[in-house]
Image (cartoon, rainbow, N blue to C red):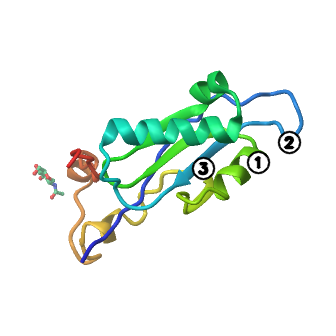
């Protein structure tokens, strides 16, 4: 079974503190589906070209990109205005465009995630040193 864990974490990028809602840039995820077969560099170029078309300014496009994802899925994160996000949504190669939300980290489900039943005796000194995570190995 192919299980696609779609976890995108972004460090909050600087947002413009002036201007109206329509011109304010916020982080968005632009999702284009499975891993492209064209290679990482060509994928980055494709993401850049899409951004330039949507933003209509090469230097702002370069500043706006946060990250290109091309190893596990095809997507990029960028600082966009709502209008630019709408333009990207209309592209044939784009599946979805959605605002990136900052999630608060909770560990209340960590035991379920690692398959540890509630009946297992707790040992907090050991548990406090346990890190559960996902690693992108690049394959
Ligand atoms: C917790 O684990 C540590 C390290 O294995 C052990 O030394 C300690 O006795 C354990 N504490 C309890 C309450 O089981």
Determine whether the residue tagged by mark 1 lies in a helix, strand or loop.
Answer: helix
**Crowding at label 3, few (<14), some or many (≥20) Cα neighbours within 10 Å?**
some
Instruction: Give the mark, 3 or 1, whose residue is nearer the N terminus.
Output: 1
24, 132: nearer the viewer: 24
Ligand 1 within 8 angstroms of badge 1 C-beta: no
Residue highlighted by disc 3 = 100
* Residue occupying image coordinates x 55% and y 37%: 49
Q: Residue furthest top?
A: 59
Image position, residue 68 (x, y; %): 44, 40
Mark 3 → mark 1, Cα distance in angstroms? 13 Å
- Asked whether the residues under the numbered discs 2 and 3 touch, taking CB atoms below 8 Å apart as contact, a structural biologist would say no
Instruction: Give the mark, 1 or 2, whose residue is nearer the N terminus.
Output: 2
Q: Residue furthest right?
A: 20
Mark count = 3
Determine whether the residue tagged by mark 2 lies in a helix, strand or loop.
Answer: loop
Q: Is residue 117 left or right of residue 53?
A: left
Image position, residue 63 (x, y; %): 60, 25
Mark 2 → mark 3, Cα distance in angstroms? 16 Å
**Crowding at label 1, few (<14), some or many (≥20) Cα neighbours within 10 Å?**
some
Residue highlighted by disc 2 = 21
Residue highlighted by disc 1 = 82
* Residue occupying image coordinates x 71% and y 33%: 56
**Crowding at label 2, few (<14), some or many (≥20) Cα neighbours within 10 Å?**
few
- Asked whether the residues under the numbered discs 1 and 2 touch, taking CB atoms below 8 Å apart as contact, a structural biologist would say yes
* Residue occupying image coordinates x 36% and y 62%: 5
Quadrant placement of the N terminus: bottom left
Image position, residue 85 (x, y; %): 69, 49
């Amino acid at each position: 079974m192919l299980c696609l864990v779609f976890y995108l974490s972004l460090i909050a990028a600087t947002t413009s503190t002036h201007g109206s809602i329509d011109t304010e840039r916020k982080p968005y995820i632009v999702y284009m589906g499975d891993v492209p077969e064209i290679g990482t560099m060509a994928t980055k170029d494709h993401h850049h070209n899409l951004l330039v078309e949507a933003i209509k300014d090469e230097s702002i496009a370069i500043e706006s990109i946060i990250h290109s994802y091309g190893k596990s899925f095809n997507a990029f994160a960028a600082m966009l205005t709502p209008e630019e996000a709408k333009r990207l949504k209309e592209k044939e190669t784009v599946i979805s465009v959605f605002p990136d939300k900052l999630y608060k980290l909770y560990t209340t489900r960590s035991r379920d995630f690692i398959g540890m039943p509630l009946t297992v005796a707790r040992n907090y000194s050991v548990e406090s040193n346990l890190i559960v995570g996902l690693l992108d190995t690049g394959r």
